[in-house]
Amino acid sequence: MRLVARTNPVSRLAAAIVVTAPLLLTLDWSSSAVILAFELVLLLAAGAKLGWILRSTWPLLIAAPLAGIGMLLYGEPSGHEYASFWLAHITSGSIALAIAVSLRALAIGVPSILLFRGVDPTELADGLAQRVRLPAQLVLGTLAAQRLAGLLISDWRQMSLARRARGLGDAAAIRRFLGMAFALLVLAIRRGTKLATAMEARGFGAPGPRTWARPSTFGGRDAALVAIAAVVAATGLGLDLAFGTLHWVWS
């Protein structure tokens, strides 16, 4: 993944959008399988190890089959019926739909997880503001919120230890959770208010163009990444059209 790690985070975002856009508009197993196969081959060619891919995407590997099981049992029945009980009907149509949904979830989730693994939020914010031309106030506010979100886990742990030290952490689990959640909400609002005031005092909310400490560049490597994503997406749709298996989500 060294080649991908050297690209601009904006190009990774664009590549993920390009390669997953057809999957959001279609619902057939063939295009999802083709695009997923291309994604895995390209990731391995870029230097990713199979074990690293499995470790990075294990929640998705569990969630995708579960989504398929739901479609298998409760999807719209069509074709030959193999089994049925109460509201569940297993038919040839529901089986095809379950396979399509599982592969679709993997094809959408795998590149999204792996392309953004290890991305510096500050670099992504710089790219969105400088290359995509998003409003600086929106980008900087979102970046500040993302930075503060990482503190919530630490705050929750500290509050839990403090309550245990006072003898309040071993009983009434639901009441303890609600009390800590409310305290954490109050703390987050106070911290966010202070940060907003500090940023406003430093001119982050000033109108007009602003300067950036680190320029965000978009070079040939970034264009190649987006182009490869477009080729993968076009190949999946092209094979669907060639074999007549294209199925739009609204049809």
Image (cartoon, grey):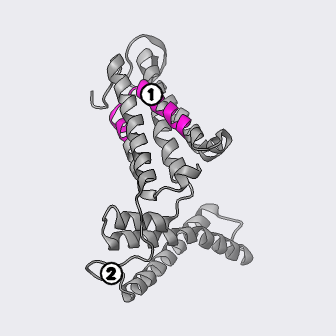
Residue 202, can we see it? yes
Residue 205: mark: 2
Q: Is mark 1 on a helix, strand or loop?
A: helix
Residue farthest toward the bottom in the current orientation of the protein? 201
Report which quarter residue 240 is drawn in: top left
Percent from the top left, x then y, of residue 49? 65, 42
Q: Residue at x 46, y 51 (%)?
A: 221
Inter-mark Cα distance, 2 to 1? 46 Å
Q: Which residue is drawn at 39% across and 36% down?
A: 231
Q: Residues within 10 Å of mark 2 (few under 14, many from 20)?
A: some
The boundaries of the magenta stretch are 20-42
205 left or right of 102 in image: left
Residue 172 to residue 58: above or below: below
Q: Name the residue under label 1.
A: 100
Q: What element carries label 2?
A: loop
Q: Residue at x 71, y 66 (%)?
A: 170
Q: Which residue is drawn at 74% across and 77% down?
A: 165
Q: Cβ–Cβ below 8 Å for labels 2 and 1?
A: no
194 within the magenta span: no
The secondary structure that most of the magenta stretch takes on is: helix
Percent from the top left, x then y, of residue 173? 64, 62
Residue 223: mark: none
160 left or right of 240 in image: right
